[in-house]
Image (tube, rainbow, N blue to C red):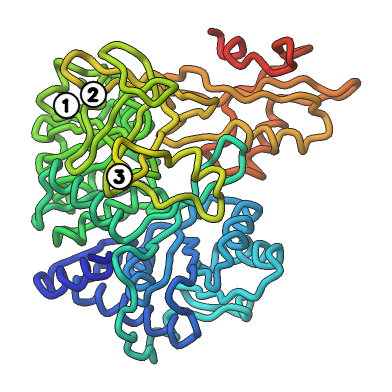
Amino acid sequence: MRLDELLRESAARYAAKTAVVAGGCRVSYAELDRLADQLAGVLHERGVRRGDRVVVYHRNAVEVVAAVFGVSRMGGVFSLVNPKVKHEKLALIVGGLRASVVLTESSLMPSVRRAAVATGSPIMIFVTDQVGPLLADATGLRDALIAAPNPPPAPAVDLDLAYVAYTSGSTGVPKGVMMTHQSSVSGAASMVRYLGLASEDVNFCVIPLAFDYGLYQAIMAVMTGGTLVLEEGFALPPVAIRKMVAEGATVFPLVPTIAAMLLQFRGLASNSVPSLRILTSTGAPLPPAHSARLCEIFPSARLFSNYGLTEIVRGTYLPPDQLVARPESVGKAMPNSEAHVVDENGQPVGPGVVGELVFRGASVLKGYWENAEATDAALRAGPYPWEKVFYTGDHFRTDDEGYLYYVGRKDDMIKSRGEKVSPKEIENALYALPSIREAAVVGVPHPLFGTAIKAVLVLADGAVASDREVIAHCAAHLEEHLVPQIVEFRDELPKTESGKIRRRELEGR
């Protein structure tokens, strides 16, 4: 089954039901299905064909959900990009994909223009809101949809590529994770199964749809005929709580940073959202104290602690009835998948032994976009001759009953605010400062972020710089979650005999 078929089926069953609520806009399943049809027709009319890539650079909105299913419906490949991404990275993504279309909003047009110029290739730009005089080089999507032709019969099959999601790599260069319709639908079905989602559920999503955790909230809602309530963030917990109550939210996906913000809000009374029945968390494991407090505040909700990567949709989950007995565990593999801890030779290890987590199942990525080296490193021969399994690059151990415990990263990647951060990407930005001679970025414990980003710097001879200047520079060139919270200056960095930086010493280990 393809992603667009999920919407077609739910529209047939729940035509008048609210599908998405976002920015004061409420659309039914019939309306969302029609929007997807119209977008598919417009793209096809403009020459977009099966396998062509469409970049969606947009804040959470109904149009983003419509694009996911509309691009899929005409056989295209979508790539959702975080609107906080700077134009340099946007150019890498658009150019690397050789995208034919960028779907955006007028406030983001300056970045889109700069990215388009950097790629040096002609790109169609559709703007979802009103096109003003400064947007003469773009097409207003609303105007285009009015006269949209009917979409052609869907040419795709479930083994075709559905989307490419970009994630930071250890080299600092973003990698494009390729996911098929089969992988996407299978992963969503597994999560629906263990979470017990139903058509009555109302998912309150503050996670950007550009992150796979957010994207799958939309896919699961459409798969079950539920309602998706989209917000742009969680900056004001009291406002979000009131909205959750007003919408009758039953599902609330969060990351450790959101959990910490909630728990710091003193005005939050127990059972303040009585309709809530499911809490999910992914990214870095929640601190046990945070898990316990969330269960106290939301007594009607079951908390599912998850481990997942973009490359596998979602990997493991801890059943809520195991939360007290195993508060630090991320559980076992989700349905229709398997997870094993292996040694350096790929052989399974016993309980308590630390090794790399290996994952197998239908939700595993197809590979990395035009990156054979990274693909070969991550997808390796499995226990059976007909498959390859995914090596996560993360260290785990199991207990005597097979429950998994996250130990740490295999490489130097940092998990901060629930997101994977590449030190190399930040270091590259730091080295753009003439005053910096050497730079190393590490993760250190932090009460709010779980892990904070720390930049340790050595200044060039005679150079002067302050931590404020460094942070301001990073904020101008990097996404918000990549900006260091701590800046430390040293006379030199600790190194091995071969000249490699001893990062563990910078972490205080």
Of residues 340 and 471, the one nearer the viewer is 340
Q: Earlier in the sequence, mark 1 or mark 3?
A: 3
Question: What is the CA distance from the residue labelled 2 to the residue labelled 3?
Answer: 22 Å
Q: Percent x, y for residue 335? A: 17, 41
Q: Residue furthest right?
A: 462
Q: Is residue 476 rendered to the left or right of residue 350?
A: right
Where, by quadrant of the figure, is residue 121 drawn? bottom right
Q: Residue type at mark 2: give it.
A: Ser
Residue drawn at the location 42% of the way across and 53% of the way down? 210
Residue found at x 29% / y 52%: 216
Number of residues whose C-alpha sits closer than 10 Å to that of mark 2, classed few (under 14), some (14–19) or many (20 or more): many
Residue at figure coordinates x 71%, y 33% from the top left: 430
Residue at disc 2, secondary structure:
helix
Q: Are marks 2 and 1 in contact (CB under 8 Å)?
A: yes
| Contact? badges 2 and 3 (CB < 8 Å) | no
Label 1: which residue? 295
Q: Which residue is mark 3?
A: 239
The residue lying at 52 percent from left, 26 percent from top is 411
How far apart are labels 2 and 1 at the CA level?
6 Å
**For the residue labelled by badge 3, is the local secondary structure a helix, a strand or a loop?**
helix
